[in-house]
Image: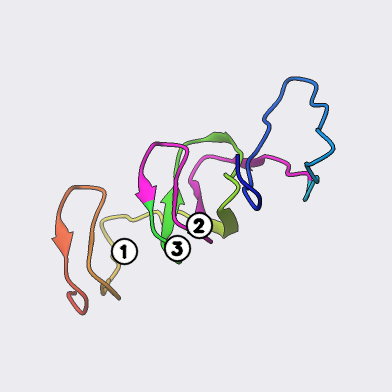
Amino acid sequence: REAGDEWHFTGPGTYLPRVEVEEVESIDATVIRHNQALRILATKQCVDSYGVKREAGERWLVREQGAFLPGPHEVVEGRVKAVILTDKKALHLEAVRDFTDVYGIERKAGEE
């Protein structure tokens, strides 16, 4: 490791820090419940817990139920609740930037 590097020590385990290491903060896991997701922000270029390369400022959702522990360069911005759609309810959506959706379809900024 080099001076200025940040990393997580994830338990269970006992960590005895070296003299050259400073504890920045203690992080608790966030529980994702049914019909919820977490909005995550990358603060620096990193690889997320699923092995996907993320750029600084990139946002994404984590949808898997259970405990989620953000990486050292990830911030949980908040929870997102699912919208239950019926045959009498629909959503009108517009892409704010280019991206590929969860179904593998490329969406362009401004596309509705």
2 to 105, vertically: above or below: above
Toward the viewer: 80 or 41? Answer: 41
Task: Compute the Cα span from label 2 to label 3.
Answer: 14 Å
Give whichever of discs 2 and 3 has the lower sequence position: 2
In this rendering, the label closer to the viewer, 1 or 3: 3
Task: Compute the Cα span from label 2 to label 1.
Answer: 24 Å
Q: Does the magenta-highlighted stretch encompass residue 38?
A: yes
* Residue found 17% across the figure and 75% down from its top: 111
Q: Does the magenta-highlighted stretch encompass residue 15?
A: no
The residue singled out by tag 1 in the image is: 89
In terms of secondary structure, where does tag 3 sit? Answer: loop
As drawn, the label of residue 56 is: 3
The residue singled out by tag 2 in the image is: 39
**Callout 3: 10 Å neighbours few (<14), some, many (20+)?**
few
Q: In the image, is 101 to the left or to the right of 58?
A: left
* Residue found 78% across the figure and 42% down from its top: 21
Give whichever of discs 2 and 1 has the lower sequence position: 2
